[in-house]
Image: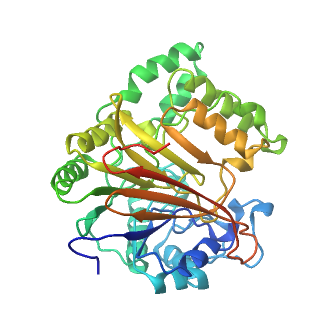
Amino acid sequence: TLPVGDVDRFGLGLFSCSNLPMGWFNAYAHAAGRDDLDLWLHVGDYIYEYGIASYKGNDLVVGREVVPAHDHEMISLVDYRLRFACYRADPDLQKLHQMAPMIALWDDHEITNDSWEGGAQNHQPSSEGDWNTRRTAAMQAYREWLPVSEEPWKAYRIGMLATLYRTESRVLARTQPASAELAKAHQAGNPDVALASFRDGAWQDPSATMLGSEQESWLAQQLKRNAADSTWQMVGMGTIIGRTLMPEETPGWVRPEAGDSTVNKFKRDVRASKLGLPMWMDRWDGYPAARSRLLKSAQQADADLVMLSGDSHNAWAYSLAENGQPAGIEFACHSVTSHGIEGQLGEDPKNVAAAFVATNPELAWGDTSHRGYMMIDITPQCVTGEWLFMRTIKSRSTALAGTRRMSAERGRRKFSV
């Protein structure tokens, strides 16, 4: 159903992180009521695996119960099937699927938190069984409920206007993130020395991969082939590729109720950031060699690269660079309902966002206080992203609290100022 030939304009709705017990899917309702969007792209965390015991009382919204309703996480095929059925009983999500086709890719919560090819942070074999059994069950339920092929990755041509790529970066070939090695460095007798050693050693491992060698090669070849006769190369990705360091001020902004553990974690993040190490090992920042390979492949293909990502729950715009040269832009979508970093911080969100922008050269703009979705407007000369902020997720409403638009012109490969 995608257009062929010359295309003057295409509208894409972008979604991420829809945790049903935390709120109403007002973002879906608002998007479904529009007539200027041709396709939905969901970049992951379409469902969440958590048992009800994992939620804090004030995180839960009345009327947003899930099944299965037991305390433990989803583990079996029946668990995952029931959870999908529960989500798809939501009228706003039903309407979304009714109004336009969706290209969807999974992130981690369709299986379990912080997953990789051999396991996950939130999978304990001693109590939750074999990882491969759980992963297979989750993937089967996903493909039963969502309109995607069984191909793990795929390219979709939108005429000569753009090529949209569905990727898989979570469970088939992704190597284990270096989180444990980073934690050991923080616990060393001289953390600064240990962190510098980790930065120059394990963190730079060229064998560490998000996509796996087969998909990396496929994507590089596709970018080279399609950039010749397709204006925009738009890569849907579960996690953010833009580099992000923790601002020095952040530990002082932690809410008292967040506890000392959060303060101490943020202090460790700041210490690592001063040495050039990112906040999150679980996203592309934790795989710098693989990140460079992807961005270099876009540069070598002379591609106008547009990354479309999610996972962080907050809204970000990155002008990506590699070897000091522009490599593309990234629209990082805020969540439909999942809480962002603002839940841990008591500071004015505008000051938080300003500190992140000041700390991170690639970051052009950010918002750390709203839920919602994005509209991506694509024309031959310009791609524009609009973040739409819902006024509330605590009750059903399509009222907006505001919007933000940012654009990039063809050939510039960075956001217009």
| Residue 393 lies in quadrant | bottom right
Work out whether residue 116 can be spotted. Answer: no
Q: Which percent across, then down, holds residue 7?
A: 28, 71
| Residue 135 lies in quadrant | bottom left
What residue is rendered at 29% in x and 81% in y? Answer: 1
Work out whether residue 294 can be spotted. Answer: yes
Q: Which percent across, then down, holds residue 319?
A: 44, 41
Asked if residue 261 lies left or right of residue 381, the reply is: right
Asked if residue 378 lies left or right of residue 360, the reply is: left
Q: Which percent across, then down, holds residue 388?
A: 60, 63
Q: Is residue 74 above or below residue 101?
A: above
Q: Which percent across, then down, holds residue 185?
A: 53, 23
What residue is rendered at 55% in x and 36% in y? Answer: 279
Asked if residue 333 lies left or right of residue 339, the reply is: left
- Colouring method of the image: rainbow
What residue is rendered at 70% in x and 33% in y? Answer: 250
Q: Is residue 171 above or below residue 73?
A: above
What residue is rendered at 42% in x and 42% in y? Answer: 284
Q: Is residue 307 above or below residue 6?
A: above
Residue furthest right in the image: 256
